[in-house]
């Protein structure tokens, strides 16, 4: 990619988004790194400086749940740089719980951040991506393919994103825009910590689901013990941005590929149910 290429990335204060911003800059992109709270740029600036790419990263405020903020951020990029070549939808938030333990507000919050925010950014960016034959890359999750215990709302939102993008991709291609989804599995980043989970409180409020939740939490903690790094996941995002012919669906590790593959070959759902049942039965 040439120095004139500009990419807007959402959710860059930490984790995959931060790593993707730095990696994209290192690959030659001019990066507009957006985050809801511009005051939380310390880690990003430090990582960019360490990588020697601070001059290729510009920070901007963007709250994906605020349509006015989305439009303003996109329009500012185009006004300042003359074009927008790519977008990486990365901003997201977890939501642990199951149907009886979640409120309507919990479910709506998960959808606002993880789904409607993606839709808003995509809608605002598409006219500009169409103008240059650009790229739209959305970070979903293996949880956008395989429904996971105690992730009802989160997986529902990520499933929605996958359906949205899978439907959009062939239409966008007719006007020159390539659409891809990137599906990380367990990533050793601040994403889990950012949920600020009070595990004793969760278990205390779980009622009849407490034994299953205990098993799920123990399994999840163990899975993050050997998770891939944010930098590894970011490398898959940037490779998708840079590819001459990017695939629609990209997993960020062999582990993620195997996990997603279980679902994509599971016609009656029995293989997935056997897999995830083990997470909650101990």
Image (cartoon, rainbow, N blue to C red):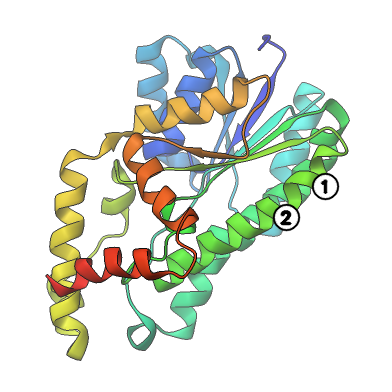
- Front-lying residue, 251 or 238: 251
Residues 160 and 277: in front is: 277
Q: Is residue 22 visible?
A: yes
What x and y, as percent, mark residue 125? 76, 42
- Quadrant of the rendered structure where residue 127 is? top right
Q: Which residue is mark 2?
A: 167
The quadrant of the image that shows the C terminus is bottom left
Count residues near mark 2 (Cα–Cα under 10 Å), then give few for <14, some for 14-19, many for 20+: few
Q: Secondary structure at mark 2?
A: helix
The structure residue drawn at horizontal position 59% and vertical position 55%, both measured from the top left corner, is: 162
Quarter of the picture holding the N terminus:
top right
How many other residues sit within 10 Å of disc 1, few (<14), some (14-19) or many (≥20)? few
Quarter-wise, where is residue 120 in the image? bottom right
Q: Between 206 and 261, which is closer to the camera in this rendering? A: 261
Residue 71 appears in the figure: no
Q: Quadrant of residue 199?
A: bottom left
Asked if 84 appears above or below 64 in the picture, the reply is above
Residue at x-position 19% and y-position 74%? 213
Residue 239 vs residue 94: left or right?
right
Query: Residue 252 got which mark?
Result: none
Left or right position of 92 against 125? left
Picture coordinates of residue 3, whole percent (x, y): 67, 9
Task: State the residue at coordinates (50%, 68%).
Answer: 156
**Residue closest to the eye, 114 or 254:** 254
Task: Give the residue at x 46% y 37%.
Answer: 17
Residue corresponding to mark 1: 171
Mark 2 touches mark 1? (CB < 8 Å): yes
Residue 87, given in percent of the width and then of the height, sits at 65, 36
Q: Is residue 26 above or below residue 178?
A: above
Q: Residue 244: percent from the left, percent from the top?
A: 68, 19
């Amino acid at each position: 990619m040439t120095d004139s290429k500009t990419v807007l990335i959402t959710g860059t204060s930490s984790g995959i988004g931060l790593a993707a911003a730095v990696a994209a800059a290192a690959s030659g992109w001019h990066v507009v790194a957006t985050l809801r709270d511009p005051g939380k740029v310390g880690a990003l600036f430090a990582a960019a400086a360490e990588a020697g790419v601070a001059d290729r990263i510009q920070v901007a405020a963007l709250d994906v749940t605020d349509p006015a903020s989305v439009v303003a951020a996109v329009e500012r990029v185009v006004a300042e740089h003359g074009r927008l070549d790519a977008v990486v939808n990365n901003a997201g938030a977890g939501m642990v719980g199951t149907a009886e333990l979640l409120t309507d507000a919990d479910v709506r919050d998960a959808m606002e951040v993880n789904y409607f925010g993606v839709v808003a950014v995509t809608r605002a960016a598409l006219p500009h991506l169409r103008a240059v034959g650009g790229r739209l890359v959305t970070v979903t999750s293996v949880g956008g393919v395989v429904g996971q215990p105690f992730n009802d709302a989160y997986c529902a939102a990520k499933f929605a994103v996958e359906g949205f993008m899978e439907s959009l991709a062939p239409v966008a291609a007719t006007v020159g825009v390539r659409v891809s989804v990137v599906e990380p599995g367990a990533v050793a980043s601040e994403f889990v910590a950012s949920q600020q989970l009070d595990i004793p409180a969760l278990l205390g409020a779980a009622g009849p689901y407490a034994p299953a939740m205990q098993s799920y939490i123990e399994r999840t903690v163990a899975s993050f013990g050997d998770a891939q790094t944010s930098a590894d996941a970011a490398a898959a995002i940037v490779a998708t941005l840079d590819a001459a012919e990017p695939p629609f669906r990209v997993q960020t590790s062999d582990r993620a590929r195997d996990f997603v593959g279980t679902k994509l070959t599971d016609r009656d759902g029995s293989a997935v149910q056997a897999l995830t049942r083990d997470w909650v039965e101990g």
